[in-house]
């Protein structure tokens, strides 16, 4: 059974409008951040007006996880250059400001920025996005009195992991008087736990209910709980936020496969650096810079730069996905290759909320490069439609089949790179 976990989208952030744009705006709206950075540093844009450069840098610093710098640039733009910006651009900046605050665990500031966006700059959002923003604000408002998450790494940690029935990495997570194996998933925007295990782990439940859109496009009713303290090896995490799902939403194959919980991006990111080999997950006390810059975060979704032929493609990055798959943009750009070399089939995608079906093609192999290393996508599926908004923007989702071709994978959130050891 193939289960691709776990995608949650609170809002897409940009409306893909048909209006004419300059090349930098086109790169921005289509989330081509790696190329935007290259272009902004090139001679072609050396004379770009200062406020326009600041505008693009605010998005780039957000993507490359320099959140405080991004917020400072947004503050400067709104204080000094507001008259030079359109209401749509101000709305986009406010969305990045919300995203920065969420990643910094500044929930009250995220709520206040969301209210400003909804009341003064709602024209920047489509009706669907407005509904998503209102729904996500239920979370930020509900969390506004919760202290910021804190992670303490007192020593190097080596944590043995297991693979579950779906082949996903699970790690032992200890609460006050209990320990369970949870899926370790960079693709989960917020950590998740089922209702029954939220009770067993004694999570502090908040009186907040909202809807979450899963990878299938279906909506799941959820609530919030706080783990005042949990341990991952010798790593201590305080004030960790979990979305609480009905048990049935994380039960698959007629109950034969069940997930107790998922450690998501906010917890994983604070580990700073993670090494994953065939048996262990290692968290060093001090993160190391390897002078690689191929990694970014779009909202709460990790993104990696992948080479194909002479092209540089952005993929979402998901340790919870068993297999890499290619999205609609890949099919669109390389349609002749896919139509001639692939064969069609009906693809089933599982996630919280159920199963979605989509027409897809299968290619026997696609060579790629990542972090200067060569790898091979074997028997890879290419989707022709997009069950989620992000699938329209990114060329694929990077899964465990690529990671397993190497001795070790290193994910570094301090210096923003992913590296591989042969």
Image (cartoon, rainbow, N blue to C red):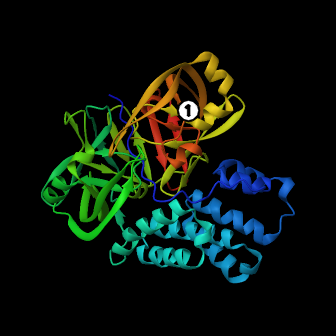
Q: Which of 283 and 357 lies nearest the eye of the viewer?
A: 357
Q: Position of residue 216 (x, y in %)?
A: 40, 43
Q: Which of 62 and 410 lies nearest the eye of the viewer?
A: 62
Residue shown at 77%/52% (left/top)?
39
Does 116 appear above or below 364?
below
Q: State how many labels appear.
A: 1
User: Which residue matches tag 1?
Assistant: 384
Q: Can you say which quadrant of the picture contains the N terminus?
A: top left
Q: Position of residue 59 (x, y in %)?
A: 64, 62
Residue shown at 61%/75% (left/top)?
72
Residue shown at 77%/76% (left/top)?
84
Q: Where is residue 332 in the image (x, y as percent from the top left)?
A: 65, 33
Let me know if residue 45 appears in the view: yes
Q: Residues within 10 Å of mark 1 (few under 14, many from 20)?
A: many
Q: Where is residue 217 in the image (x, y as percent from the top left)?
A: 42, 47
Say whether residue 63 is left or right of residue 276.
Answer: right
In this view, the residue farthest toward the bottom is: 79
- SS class, disc 1: loop
Q: Which of 407 and 130 lies nearest the eye of the viewer?
A: 130
Does 78 appear above or below 395?
below
Does 385 appear above or below 146?
above
Residue 231 image-quadrant placement: bottom left
Residue shown at 47%/64% (left/top)?
131
């Amino acid at each position: 059974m193939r289960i691709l976990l776990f995608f949650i989208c609170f809002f897409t952030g940009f409306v893909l409008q048909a209006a004419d744009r300059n090349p930098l705006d086109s790169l921005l709206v289509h989330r081509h951040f790696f190329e935007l950075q290259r272009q902004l540093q090139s001679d072609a844009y050396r004379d770009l007006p200062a406020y326009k450069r600041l505008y693009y840098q605010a998005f780039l610093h957000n993507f490359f996880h320099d959140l405080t710098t991004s917020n400072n640039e947004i503050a400067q733009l709104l204080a000094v250059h507001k008259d030079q910006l359109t209401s749509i651009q101000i709305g986009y900046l406010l969305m990045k400001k919300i995203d920065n605050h969420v990643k910094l665990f500044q929930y009250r500031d995220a709520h206040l920025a969301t209210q400003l966006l909804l009341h003064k700059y709602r024209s920047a959002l489509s009706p669907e996005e407005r509904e998503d923003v209102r729904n996500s604000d239920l979370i930020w408002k509900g969390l506004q009195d919760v202290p910021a998450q804190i992670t303490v790494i007192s020593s190097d940690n080596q944590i043995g992991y297991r693979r579950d029935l779906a082949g996903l990495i699970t790690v032992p997570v200890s609460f006050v008087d209990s320990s369970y194996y949870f899926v370790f998933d960079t693709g989960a925007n917020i950590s998740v736990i089922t209702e029954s295990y939220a009770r067993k782990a004694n999570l502090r439940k908040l009186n907040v209910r909202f809807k979450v859109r899963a990878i299938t496009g279906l909506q799941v009713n959820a609530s919030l709980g706080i783990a005042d303290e949990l341990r991952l090896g010798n790593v201590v995490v305080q004030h960790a936020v979990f979305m609480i799902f009905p048990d049935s939403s994380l039960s698959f194959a007629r109950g034969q496969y069940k997930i107790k919980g998922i450690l998501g991006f906010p917890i994983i990111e604070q580990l700073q650096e993670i090494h994953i080999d065939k048996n262990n997950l290692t968290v060093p006390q001090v993160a190391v810079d390897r002078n690689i810059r191929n990694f970014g975060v779009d909202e709460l979704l990790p993104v990696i730069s992948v080479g194909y032929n002479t092209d540089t493609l952005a993929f979402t990055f998901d340790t919870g996905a068993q297999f890499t798959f290619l999205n609609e943009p890949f099919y669109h750009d390389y349609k002749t290759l896919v139509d001639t070399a692939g064969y069609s089939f009906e693809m089933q995608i599982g996630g919280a909320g159920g199963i979605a079906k989509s027409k897809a093609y299968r290619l026997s192999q696609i060579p790629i490069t990542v972090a200067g290393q060569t790898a091979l996508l074997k028997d890879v599926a290419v989707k022709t439609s997009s069950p989620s908004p992000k699938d329209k923007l990114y060329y694929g989702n990077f899964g465990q089949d690529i990671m397993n071709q190497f001795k070790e994978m290193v994910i570094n959130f301090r210096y923003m790179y992913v590296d591989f050891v042969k």
